[in-house]
Amino acid sequence: MASFSVILGIIGNVISILMFLSPVKTFRRIVKKKSIEDFKGVPYITTLLSTSLWSFYGILKPGGLLVLTVNGAGAILHIIYVTLFLIYAPKDVKVKSLKLVAIVDVGFFGVVVAVTLLALHGSLRLTAVGLLCTGMTIGMYASPLSVMRTVIKMKSVEYMPFFLSFFQFLNGGVWAAYAVLVKDIYLGVSNGIGFILGSAQLLLFVIYKNKSPSKSKDAVEEEEGGGGSAQPVKGVMQMEDFDNNEKMKTVSLNQDAFGSTGSKDLELGVKENL
């Protein structure tokens, strides 16, 4: 069973790293054009927080090496993404983004680490960080509920990218199984919910994939109170279908129990890395 848990953890690492690599195509474009265009930095800044917290959890947890390695890799990649974004962002966006990095990735993360190490002791440290990470991951996995409602009303999966749903299902399932084997309730609860919601999204694809929308997106928005756009999501952070300029909410992998990336990034990045 121990060997099987290691195998599952390695598979989970591969899936998560593929998701973390999905923005590579976007940043190649940014570097090539020397401009962030309409891309937003929030998804990468918040995913950096998520991967950093899960890395810290992996350090605190006995036998948490696989959790540490995948999220450590995700944190390093997102440091690169955030740095590139800041380099090519116009001055006003750069200033706002730097403030967000200082507050979220330095300030908040630093406070969590300091309080955990200085004010908490023993198993309470792991419990506090585990609950925080679990809450963030549940928020990531629960966020697609809004777009699932839109899919049902429109009777169309036009605004639910397949790869986003598929990898949520796959990622949640693998890490939930790993959590059961190693008896990690924090990984288990959050990724178990992700697996269930991912399964529900794939079921909607099967039901509505060949059907034409019965209502327009604008009509659905008006019924729901107007103003908002259909927003596919994957994480505690907001991700965007950048190339189509369609906003979508998302959380990381590790996305994600562990961080996340936008659906267009995900679809392009996965195809490029498979």
Image (tube, grey):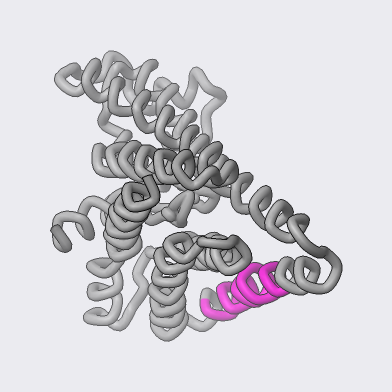
Most extreme residue toward the right is: 119
Q: Tell me the magenta residue range.
A: 94-110
Q: Is residue 224 left or right of residue 31?
A: right
Residue 57, percent from left and from top:
59, 62
Q: Quadrant of residue 49?
A: bottom right
Image-based side of 30 in relation to 236, left or right: left
203 vs 25: above or below: above
Q: Is residue 26 magenta?
A: no
Q: Looking at this view, is 250 or 231 the one in front?
A: 250
Above or below residue 74? Residue 88 is below
| Quadrant in which residue 189 is drawn | top right
Residue that appears at 65% across and 76% down: 106
Point out residue 93 in the picture as x, y percentages from the top left corner: 52, 74
Q: Main secondary structure of the magenta part?
A: helix
Residue 1 left/right relative to 117: left
On-image quarter of the C terminus: bottom left
Q: Is residue 255 visible?
A: no
Q: Residue at x 48, y 44 (%)?
A: 179
Rendered-image quadrant of the N terminus: top left
Q: Is residue 216 above or below residue 182?
A: above
Q: Is residue 175 visible?
A: yes
The percent position of residue 141, horizontal first and vertical second, equals: 48, 39
Foreground pick, 126 / 244: 126
104 is within the stretch colored magenta: yes
Q: Is residue 263 left or right of residue 268?
A: right
Q: Toward the viewer: 3 or 16?
A: 3
Q: Residue at x 31, y 57 (%)?
A: 10
Choose between 58 and 72: the one closer to the eye. Answer: 58
